[in-house]
Image: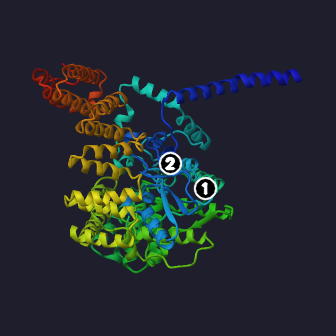
Amino acid sequence: MRLFIKTVAFYAFALLAVPLLFFLGLEQILKWLDVGEQRDYFHQFTINDIAYYQENPAFIEQFYPRSLGITPIEQVFSADPDNQVLRIFLLGGSAARGFPDPNHGLSRHLEALLAAALPERSVEVINTAMTAINSHVVYQVAKDIPGRPTDLAIILVGNNEVVGPFGPGTFAPSVLSNLSLIRGLQVVKRSRLWQLLTEFRQQLSQVDEKRALRWRGMQMFTGNTVPQDDPRLDTVYSHYTANVGDAVQTLRDKGLHVILSTVPVNLRHSAPFASAHDQMITDSNKATWETHFTRGSQALKKNQWAAAEAQLRQAVLASPNHADTHFQLATALERSGKLDEANAHYQQALDFDTLRFRADSHLNAALHHLARTAPASNFTFVDQAQRFLTTSAPHSPGWNLLLEHVHFDFMGNYLLASSFARHILNTMPDHAEAPLLDPATLAVQIGYPNFTTIEAMGRLLDMVQAPPFTGQSNHSGLIDFIDRRGASLAARVGDVDVLIEQRSKLLETLPNRWELHFELAALYRHQNDAAGAKKALDKVLRANPHHRQSLLLRAELLSRARDFSGAAQDLERALLYLTHDAPLLAQTQGALGSYYLNSEQFDQGTEVLLALIDQHPLKIESVLRAYGTLIKDSVARGLTREQIRYIADLERYANDLIKSERAADYPLLNRRMAQILSIAGKNRAARAWAQRNLNPAEP
């Protein structure tokens, strides 16, 4: 028997432990060789021996190709803050991120409210929310958060459970329905070996999947409807409950106080994106439904509420699962003053919507269940969906708090933030009860609205004029609402000079609000006042020395003033924060090399540009600009040997792009090559490139 046990143990070790040790060792070697990327949400780095955390753009690649442009919000924070820093992590999707304008989203509201309530403390809201993510991603974010016992976390997620990663309605559906397998796959996809094999497979493939896939918003999901009776929904609800529950426990194990929230959505003014009949509906019932639905819709358009109600009630009886029938019936009932019944049908319209972009009643019910079973310590449950219902009563939530289906208007964000702020303050027993800022005062303090608000409303208007919004029965009303809302905000923004005066006066009382200084810099820049913009950016960087956007903008202003040495210093600082953002890193290196050359620091400039070419061969525009700058400099300084070498290297690089078919990524290659060669006086070669066919497969 003992021999048998030893034999089994030996074979178990040989079959399991040896391969595991081999792959762990291989993974460590690949890490030492700098193959692949770290896939944690945050990465740690040091500046002057002080440790900081920063968002990691590579995190999302374990769920989506990076080409989709789904990225974390830019933020840097201390790895070891003092106890006076109140830090709150916000986890969720685009509604928590602050679409369409993160500058005035939930996190900005919350930070301003808490800063006013706690003037003696520093408040940081670290917004980890991202577009198009669901609880599978949020669970991984929770695992990666470097929390302290004094920190808090808010979880507001649920709108993308069907259309997000591993959901049955996503544009790239997965066959995995087992949560353990999904999480195991995520462990593998974070490994350097997986990244190496994926890159190798793409090199062999005729189509680079990461380059082929581009973000097209909600249009990407319109063909993937999931009706109410689809058995895959049970898996969605099960995964959601497990992911959120495990995220809560993971954060609590790190010592954080977790605030879990239900998810408010637009019920009253967001018609279903798609509707379907029950699979078992008879032809007779379908014909009956069509007759009554058509008559009811026509009566609704003519404001004949009683007639519409009567017809649509019959349509619901014939097809109880058809989402838009419930929505149109709810509209008729509301106009007839039957508000309780109308609200019930608005909720049914949401639950039966087959394009599931909104958190339905089953998902919010799952959160209630988690709240009832969660330990009492370090945990708070906030029913924000009910708060939206109560605030909107006697109606359902709609355009009074939300912009379209799930994203919050100013008052919606204020309602969420004020509730979260009050619960956060309640976790601090030594805090004296005090009223929070009212909405009007908060709007002034965060600079709402401003020009970015108007630009965001323009982007929102463009978005809702495309599918799936065009399929909503109240689409014309949605367009009209956003149009009117944008016009109203534009009227409030007013003259730039008045805005500058208002922001300057506000900063007299709030001198350390770097966000307001940055907005003031943007206003000065809008007025082409470079000196005013630079002065405001100086104040931003005194209050927040890690703000990359301010460093890059100030470098641009300094270069325009021909202070290339000062611009280079700002870009050197900015590079400290860009090591994990390859596109911006390449652009910044290119600008830095140019500034060095312009300030006659020739060795440094040449070194930076050659490093860019070597490190970022796939960033075609940046590489071509670097070659162009080197060639222009060598011509200006009469460096004939260097000029010949750069031109030869450039043509070799461009020909390699064509042979590998990567030139398809950059259709301007001919023109840019012709321009660069013209700078060097190589006019014949420039003409040849201008006429060259970039597709080697064509004659």
> Looking at numbered disc 1 in the image, what kind of residue is underneath it?
Arg
- Residue closer to the observer: 517 or 561: 561
Residue pictured at 57% horizontal, 42% vertical: 177
Earlier in the chain: of badge 2 and badge 1, it is 2
Quadrant of the frame with the N terminus: top right
- Residue closer to the observer: 572 or 78: 572
Residue 368 - label: none
- Residue closer to the observer: 569 or 498: 569
The reply to whether residue 101 is in sight is no
Q: In x, y percent, where is residue 480?
A: 26, 67
Q: Is residue 637 above or below residue 473?
A: above
| Furthest-front residue in this view | 600
Q: Is residue 435 left or right of residue 578?
A: right
The secondary structure type at the circle numbered 2 is strand
Residue pictured at 29% horizontal, 33% vertical: 605
Quadrant of the frame with the C terminus: top left
- Residue closer to the observer: 631 or 106: 631
| Furthest-right residue in this view | 1
Q: Is residue 666 left or right of residue 211?
A: left
Residue pictured at 23% horizontal, 24% vertical: 695
Residue pictured at 37% horizontal, 30% vertical: 615
Residue picked out by circle 1: 148
- Report how many numbered discs are placed on residues in the image: 2
> Looking at numbered disc 2 in the image, what kind of residue is underneath it?
Tyr
Residue picked out by circle 2: 53
Q: Is residue 261 left or right of residue 409?
A: right
Q: CA distance from mark 2 to mark 1?
A: 13 Å
